[in-house]
Amino acid sequence: MEKKHLSGFYRVFLLVLFLSFTACGKSADNWVLPSNTAKTVAETTHLKKLTIEKNAVLAAPEGYRLTLTVNGVETGQMLKTWAGVDYTFAPGAYEGDIVLTVSKANDVAWTGPGGDAGGPPENETPSAPSGFDAGMPDAYPFRQALYLDTNGIDEAKSVQAAVQGEKPAGFQFQNIKIVSKGTFYESPSSPGGTGFNGIYAAGGKYDIKNLEIDFTGDGRSDFVGFGSAVVAAGKDTRLVLDNAVIHTQGVVRSAVIAKEGSSVLVKNSRIQVKNGVLPPGYKNTMNISQMRSTLWISGMTGTTRATSLLGTGTRATYIDSTISFEGWGGLSTDIGNGAKLTVINCKINNIGNTGYGHYNNCSAVTRILGSEFNVGSVGSAGDSGSVYFGDSTREAVSALNDELELGLTAEELKAIPEKPTIINSKDQGVLWHGSGSSLTITGGTTINTEETLFVDKGAYTDINVDGSGGVQLTPGNGIIMQVMDDDEPSLEPKTNNFGVYEEPTGPVVKDDSHDITNATETDALAKFSNIELKGDFYNAARGGRKKNSMTGKMGSVSRNLGLSFDGAVITGIISASDARHYYNGKYYPKIGKAESKVFSHVVNTPGPAVNNGVIVTLKNASKWTVTGTSYLTKLSLDESSSIIPAGEDTDVSMTVNGVKTNIAPGNTYTGAIVVSVE
């Protein structure tokens, strides 16, 4: 008997009939979405089983977002393309207490510096993840378990099905848990998910206690907080988290993001973030819409910053908490201006082998009191603003409580123990690049490093160390401060990727516009008071005149090292030098991505200054014990200070412009100064 084939009309009719029995109504127990079909869910729906076949589309009406939870856990969504911001439901069979929540859209546009470019690139393909070619999207389609504003919890924008524990209500609530289980990058057709947020606070004053958030799967952008556990946004937002436990793992799956002038206080809490999986071929980029990892030119790796502070006037304070991160960074400040980051009696632990404890950017003001850092790469790094390391004294904490309006009670203030700040780094202590920033160190602060303690890569610095409270600076390689040219390669305009650093060769060209005998605010400045130091200081900046990549104008990049010692005892070499990149005993004339750990690691050969002046001032009974030949351009000693040899069998001599000269207290010497040990 001849088989009869169904016409296209009857095939469509049967498909619609099939869907009408399997996918209609909020009371249905079982939905099956066949391949290549689409369904719009008009209202929040409860199911027992949901099957989504390949290329089936499940969506919310326009102006709304759809979220899937299974047994109270958000799941099921993945990016449509690696470089885009739109999500789709992953094929699969879901079973349990299923809720499809239809919530009002919370579309957040990037409005900060650099955020005015257009949307994603045309003709983007999942197999070719884009970097600089992708502009800013029109908006990020946020979904969140709880949306908070000045009126309280916005039920219409919240996914309450993802909130376990006590039902939250009002402006003070407690004992809740939010879980999101997504996927990591697997292939171009499975870019990872879920892009879900735990709490998004867009106004109001909230106190939340005993919060637990457990997120796996990728986020999307920590510059807006898309996919982060907690986000606070806006000048009218004050968010307090007490006894929060936040675990995340994934690409840019941050724990706490404070932005747009908000105020966040996290106390008595534990935060841990782990790396995700970047797709093959992903290129490091400074395009914030596509930035999913730290830049390899930093010498570090990692895909998630634990916390970040963004925007103008934003405040974030962490008290008596532990912040752990696998890579990239623990405490970050980024795009904005004049934000305030405060860290009191916290532990910042780098549980991987690479990353920074803290990064200062965009003129941020950071105060770190009584905290312990254990990091793989750099304790603190920055390119602008000011940083303070000190003890968590009653007076200091109380003053910050008033300034930042933290609201700590008298009992809470009394209960905060006084501790010193301790920074332990397996590599370097504090690093500056870009414009540079100021650093103040007081109290009993201790910095222990395996390599150089202070590294200045062509930046302005203003370092003030007051050792009267017991400051200890211990560089593992014996170098307290290294000034050098910035060795980070620039972007290649044709490829929009970072190039390769090549060690400069040949003689240094004299910069006639630069005075090597005078230390100014545009140089590397450091003052050490009431402290005993053992280690060397080198200025290896070749300097010269270069064209500014933005203005196109020629300008000086020469840097002097200006050192002031006040009631200090110094043992070591202080000198201009020539530096070459060495790492683990091997010389690297070229540094690319594969050799990125070599950045900022050099070996010095002391020599006469060209554009790298070294200006030394000794006062108030300071003593410099010289351990090797040192080349200076200016030396000043008051009547109470002295320069002495390292041992009984040695002596110190000095020449100025080639003429042997006695070192007499109360005098200033200028020129080509060589202090030698005989």
Image (spheres, rainbow, N blue to C red):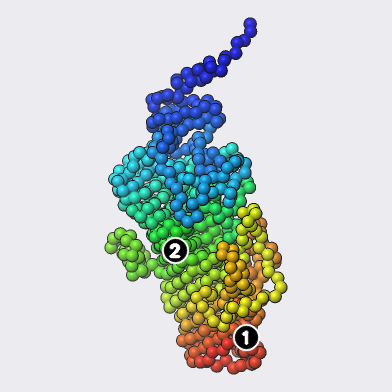
Q: Nearest the camera: 476 or 263?
A: 263
- Disc 2, SS: loop
Q: Is residue 55 above or below residue 286?
A: above
Left or right side of 531 for 579: right
Name the residue type under label 1.
Answer: Ala
Residue 161, located in which quarter of the rendered image? top left
Mark number displayed over residue 437: none
The structure residue drawn at horizontal position 65% and vertical position 65%, both measured from the top left corner, is: 583
Residue 639: image location, x then y, percent: 49, 92
Write down the residue under mark 2. 364
Residue 11: image location, x then y, percent: 54, 18
Marks 1 and 2 sit apart, C-alpha to C-alpha, by: 39 Å
Quadrant location of the N terminus in the rendered image: top right
Left or right side of 291 for 595: right
Name the residue type under label 2.
Answer: Ala
Write down the residue under mark 1. 672
Residue 492, located in which quarter of the rendered image? bottom right
The residue most toward the right is 506
The structure residue drawn at horizontal position 43% and vertical position 43%, both measured from the top left corner, is: 107
Quadrant location of the C terminus in the rendered image: bottom right
Q: Nearest the camera: 71 or 68?
A: 68
The structure residue drawn at horizontal position 31% and vertical position 64%, both measured from the top left corner, is: 402
- Disc 1, SS: strand
Q: Is residue 644 above or below residue 2?
A: below
Earlier in the chain: of badge 1 and badge 2, it is 2
Can residue 81 be seen by looking at this rendering?
Answer: yes
Question: How many residues crowd mark 2 within 10 Å: few (<14), some (14–19), many (20+)?
Answer: many
* Count of number-bearing discs: 2
Residue 301: image location, x then y, percent: 58, 55
Q: Is residue 70 above or below residue 514?
A: above
